[in-house]
Image (spheres, rainbow, N blue to C red):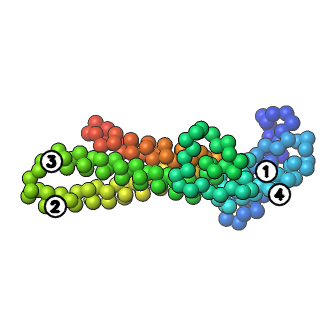
Amino acid sequence: MTFRGAPRGWMLELTAHPCPLSPPIQFNHQTPLNDPQQQRDTRQHHNCSLHYGTMAFPNDPPEDYRTPRFPSLNVQTLYDVSADKRYTLYYVLDVWRFTLLWTIIIYACFHLAAVLIAMFNHGWKKSSWKYLWAVPVVYLLMAGLEAVLAGSIVGLVLGAVYSAGYYEMNTWIPCTWGFINVLVLIISSFSIQGGL
């Protein structure tokens, strides 16, 4: 099917989707009209990419790709130039897991810092320190619950957005969103911005 408005020499394919769990029709990426062999290969190779859990449609993982171990942050450059893409996430569940873990770690650090500041500003009366040990435990439990909720929502949305755009994700992105989650929490703690 030729798509009006597409560049000359290109077409937009509309193919039946072989995956029974997905919608019956899928738009594939634009394919040059002048290479029928490439069109045939494209139709056979790219089917049901979301069902199999891959994020990048034209950027499929390399053959020897393995999901990177957490945290796998590339401190030399923001681009993953390695041949095996060891600093790149291709699967939605990996994006969710990385975002969730970073959010839990960052929430725990910020909540622990807040409770330590509060405890050291409290004073040193022996009677009040009898039950004060429970405050860090309660803060860390609350941080864990908030982080699981925020990290899960943001991680799944990130995975869906990158999957919809057929992008691959650098391992710095979940880390950055962990900090964004905690900054939203800090801003919403002020009375002026409490409506967030």
Compute the Cα span from label 3 to label 1: 67 Å
What's the mark number on residue 14? 1
Compute the Cα span from label 3 to label 2: 13 Å
What residue sits right under mark 3 in the picture? 122
**Residue 60, image x and y in percent?**
72, 51
Q: Earlier in the sequence, mark 4 or mark 1?
A: 1
Is 23 left, or right, of 105 in this rendering? Answer: right
The residue type indicated by label 1 comes to: Leu
Q: Earlier in the sequence, mark 3 or mark 1?
A: 1
Compute the Cα span from label 4 to label 3: 67 Å
Q: Nearer the viewer, mark 2 or mark 4?
A: 2
Q: Nearer the viewer, mark 2 or mark 1?
A: 2
**Number of other residues with Cα within 10 Å of mark 1, as a class: few under 14, some 14 to 19, many 20 or more:** some
Task: Residue 142: name its quadrant.
Answer: bottom left
**Residue 32, image x and y in percent?**
85, 41
**Residue 46, image x and y in percent?**
77, 55
What's the mark number on residue 36? none
What's the mark number on residue 44? 4
Compute the Cα span from label 4 to label 1: 13 Å
Compute the Cα span from label 2 to label 4: 66 Å
The residue type indicated by label 2 comes to: Tyr
Q: Residue at x 49, y 46 (%)?
A: 175
What's the mark number on residue 131? 2
